[in-house]
Image (cartoon, grey):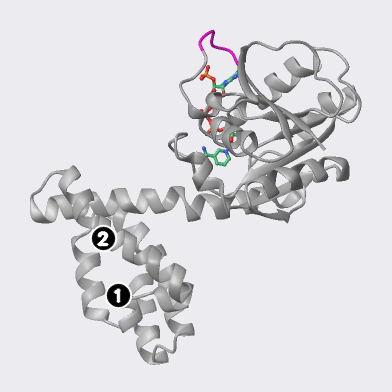
Amino acid sequence: MSRAYWIVGSGRMGLSLGSVLATSEGTSEVLLVGRRERAPEHSVLRQPVARYTHGFPGPPARGTRVLLAVPDGAITEVAAGVAALGAPGERCVALHLSGAQPAGILAPLAERGYAIGSLHPLQTVADPQSGAERLRDAFFTFEGDSEARGAAAEIVEAAEGRLLELHAADKPRYHAACVFASNYVVACAAVATRLLAEAVSISQEEAARALQPLWRGAVQNLDQLGITRALTGPVARGDVETLRGHLAVLDADTRELYRQLALRALDLSRQLGLDAAVADAIEAELRA
Ligand SMILES: NC(=O)c1ccc[n+]([C@@H]2O[C@H](COP(=O)([O-])OP(=O)(O)OC[C@H]3O[C@@H](n4cnc5c(N)ncnc54)[C@H](OP(=O)(O)O)[C@@H]3O)[C@@H](O)[C@H]2O)c1
């Protein structure tokens, strides 16, 4: 069966998913719809089934899957724009890609006859040139109509990914999980870079380079050993003196962040079998 896709928004995720779909067997068309006159410079547009159009060509034909790959704050406006194109052909599907917004924000499209859903890639894509590779094997979460689920499953299959389903009410909790796993890892990296640069009197760039093997090692440990066994460091070792030394030199904001993260590390350390009296002493120090 041949499948036609419209991807509205030629940013990081739109181009990355476009590449996955344009090289997938069964795709007859990938139409990238953008608001700029010039097509983006991206390898997806060298695929025979892919092309770029400035603005919408008219309502989509029967069976078209319309992916709204625009920032979360623009989804409502873009959905209204697609709805204003008029009635789509039969069995069209509209999916947005936000992890935070419910499928229900596509209600104007449901009223037009689209099946609606949200399909969120559990992956971070900062560079669209390598985005397709990043999406392979990724997990995706779906929420929405049962008719839209089939289209979502085909997209996930094209990425050789895995599909998880969730309810709209659980999206904020779900998205908070994603933010911890991705954005706040970056935020922690920024704190570490600043402290190292200050301690060793080097630039932020040098500090970031020096920390890279440590970040890679931590992620590899997570991958190879699982969360609990990946934890090393003073909390896992029960080293109260070292923790006290850290708390003594950090500014108030960083100390608060450190305390909260150390308490989470302490939970893991207890599970790992840290002596209960030592764990209690650490907790008292962190909550002082
Ligand atoms: N990147 C990720 O890691 C990631 C991961 C999971 C999910 N997502 C989701 O994917 C969606 C897109 O994110 P992204 O990272 O690809 O964003 P992005 O790189 O900023 O690209 C957004 C695209 O939307 C276009 N756009 C912005 N406002 C628009 C409007 N009002 N009307 C029409 N087009 C508009 C932009 O066009 P111009 O080029 O003209 O500005 C750009 O092509 C979001 O829902 C996001 O939550 C992203």
Q: Is residue 217 above or below residue 160?
A: below
- Residue in front for this viewpoint, 105 or 131: 131
Percent across and percent down for residue 261 are 40, 64
Residue 233 — which label? 1
- Which residue is more in the foreground, 4 or 8? 4
Give the residues drawn in magenta, as a range. Answer: 34-38
Residue farthest top in this picture: 37
Image coords of residue 76 (percent x, y): 70, 24
**Snapshot quadrant of residue 20:** top right
Quadrant placement of the N terminus:
top right
- Residue holding disc 2: 213
User: Which residue is pictured at 52% across the width and 15% down the height?
Assistant: 39
Q: Name the image quarter holding residue 85.
A: top right
Q: State yes or no: residue 36 in magenta.
A: yes
Q: Residue furthest left?
A: 201
- Residue 110, compared with residue 78, is above or below; it is below
Q: Dot 2: what SS?
A: helix
